[in-house]
Amino acid sequence: MNQLQKRDYFYLISSLPEMVLDQSRAPFKMVDFVAQLEEVLEPQDFAQVSLLLYPHDNRNLLRLLQENTEDWDPLGRFAAPDMQNHLKAESGLPAYMHRFYRAYQNEQPPGAAPGPDNQLSALYYSYALHHSTGFLHEWLAFERSLRNLLTAWNIRQYSLRTEGQLIGKGEEIEALQKSRARDFGLSTEYAYLHKLFNELEREDLMAREKAIDRIQWNYINEQLTFHYFTIEVVLGYLLQLQMLQRWLSLDPQAGQERVRNFISEMEQKITLA
């Protein structure tokens, strides 16, 4: 994708309140902030915002296929009737969604990833990385790598099968599949690995999740050090706001239960493997 023309958003960015991950209140609701961005950003820049929000549409697409639209995610870019019409017309959605839908209808998985969630995520990252540059591209690559690292750690921890679980190709994927080193031999690539794996070995499940988000939060701050009033700052703020709002809406007891359920599912997969 060609480098987009840089635009400055002085008023917007200078008016954004500072945030830290542990604050007790969010400065905006995500849906309100996205609506504001759609009004003030140039279309090419808001397209980058949409690219970040497509995972919400991914979840909505799966809900639609399961005939469950009651829990529709309002952060998705497409309302339920619109998504349904676009699927029927075979146009109007990002190409990877149509590809996934066709494969789902024909019961032919679009790739090696097991389960529709992973299949759709793999298609999303391939599409989003192809259609992004600069900070957005680097963030997506970082996010995918972090997701793969966490998946590989869970595979090792719970003795799961590796096939189709990791997203992407290349030397990093091979290391995650084959290396027996605690850090999969990737500490030189990812300086945060030692700290991350120490956190994952703690018994406090919520602390583990907070540590993962803190790594992402700090990565965004580091990447934006020399950006001031450009779209990159807006995208970073959006990502951090999303993390903050998730924690503020997360009931601690429910969060612990969610992680325990995940571990239980892992243990069941071990039994069935």
Image: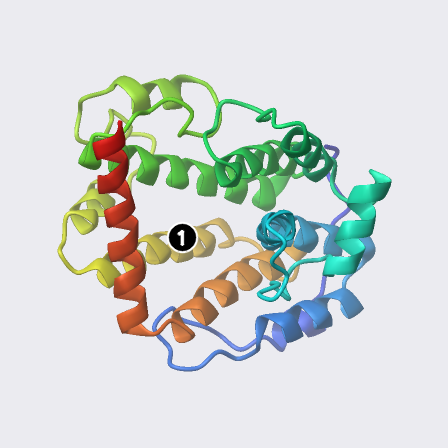
Camera-nearest residue between 199 and 218: 199
Q: Is residue 1 left or right of residue 119?
A: right
- Give SS at disc 1: helix
Colour treatment of the image: rainbow
Residue at the disc numbered 1 = 216
Q: Is residue 80 left or right of residue 145?
A: right
Camera-nearest residue between 37 and 125: 125
Crowd tier of the residue under label 1, counting other residues whose Cα lies within 10 Å: few below 14, some 14–19, many 20 or above: some
Q: Residue at x 57, y 78 (%)?
A: 28
Is residue 24 placed above or below 240 in the rendered structure?
below
Q: Is residue 239 left or right of residue 216?
A: right
Q: Residue at x 63, y 38 (%)?
A: 128
Q: Can I make out residue 16 in this image? A: yes
Q: Residue at x 35, y 18 (%)?
A: 174
Quarter of the image where one finds residue 16: bottom right
Quarter occupied by the C terminus: top left
Across and down, in percent, residue 157 comes to 19, 36
Across and down, in percent, residue 9 comes to 71, 65
Q: Amino acid at mark 1?
A: Gln
Quarter occupied by the N terminus: top right
Quarter of the image where one finds residue 30: bottom right
Q: Residue at x 51, y 64 (%)?
A: 242
Q: How many marks?
A: 1
Q: Can I make out residue 187 in this image? A: no
Is residue 123 placed above or below 37 in the rendered structure?
above
Across and down, in percent, residue 55 comes to 58, 50
Across and down, in percent, residue 259 comes to 28, 56
Is residue 199 placed above or below 10 in the rendered structure?
above
